[in-house]
Image: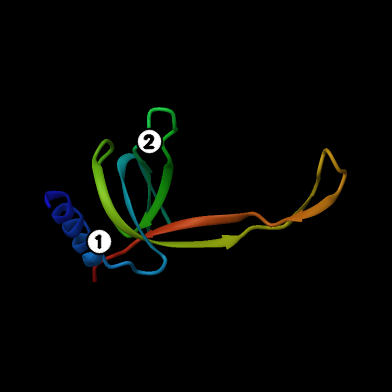
Amino acid sequence: MAEAEVQQRALAQQRQVQIIPMQVLVKGRIESSRSHDGKRYTHVMTPAPDAYTRPQLLEIRSKGRLGEKGDEITVSCVLGGYQRKAYQAKDKSSGEVTTVVPVEHTLDLVEQN
């Protein structure tokens, strides 16, 4: 009976989480921060999922500072992206030439008005 209660509580908590398309929750430690053209770019290192996996490094664009180097933060961001200039690449094994279009991902802080 206690196990069923725990499962019901977990389901209730999941229902309360509102998923918004193209938004992500970022949790990590601030590694560095810089300003450029009135925007702040903050590098955030996320915790590794396990002992054998490398942590991820993300860059978040915002209007202001998210904190100091070493601060742990949890913030909501909007996921975006754009295409870079296409280039030709040749497959080493087959010799086939293909067009590669690199895609860059961006994270913009969800700013409170």
Q: Name the residue at the top extreme.
A: 51
Q: Distance of mark 1 from mark 2, alpha carbons?
A: 23 Å
Q: Position of residue 80 (x, y in %)?
A: 47, 63
Q: Is 108 positioned to the left or the right of 84 in the image?
A: left
Q: Position of residue 101 (x, y in %)?
A: 69, 57
- The quadrant in which residue 31 appears is top left
User: 66 above or below 30?
Assistant: below
Residue 66 is at least partly visible in this image: no
SS for dot 1: helix
Which mark is in front, 1 or 2?
1
Q: Is 33 positioned to the left or the right of 93 in the image?
A: left
Instruction: Identify which residue, 11 or 86, lies in the foreground.
Output: 11
Q: Name the residue at the bottom extreme.
A: 113
- The quadrant in which residue 47 appears is top left
User: 81 above or below 47?
Assistant: below
The disc labelled 2 sits on which kind of residue? Ala
Quadrant occupied by the C terminus: bottom left
Instruction: Kindly identify the residue that appears in the image at 17 percent across and 54 percent down.
Output: 4
- Residue placed under numbered mark 2 in the picture: 48
Instruction: Identify which residue, 110 or 68, lies in the foreground.
Output: 110
Instruction: Kindly identify the residue that appears in the image at 81 percent across and 43 percent down.
Output: 91
User: Closer to the N terminus: mark 1 or mark 2?
Assistant: 1
Residue 14 bears which disc, if any? 1
Instruction: Kindly identify the residue that appears in the image at 86 percent across and 43 percent down.
Output: 94
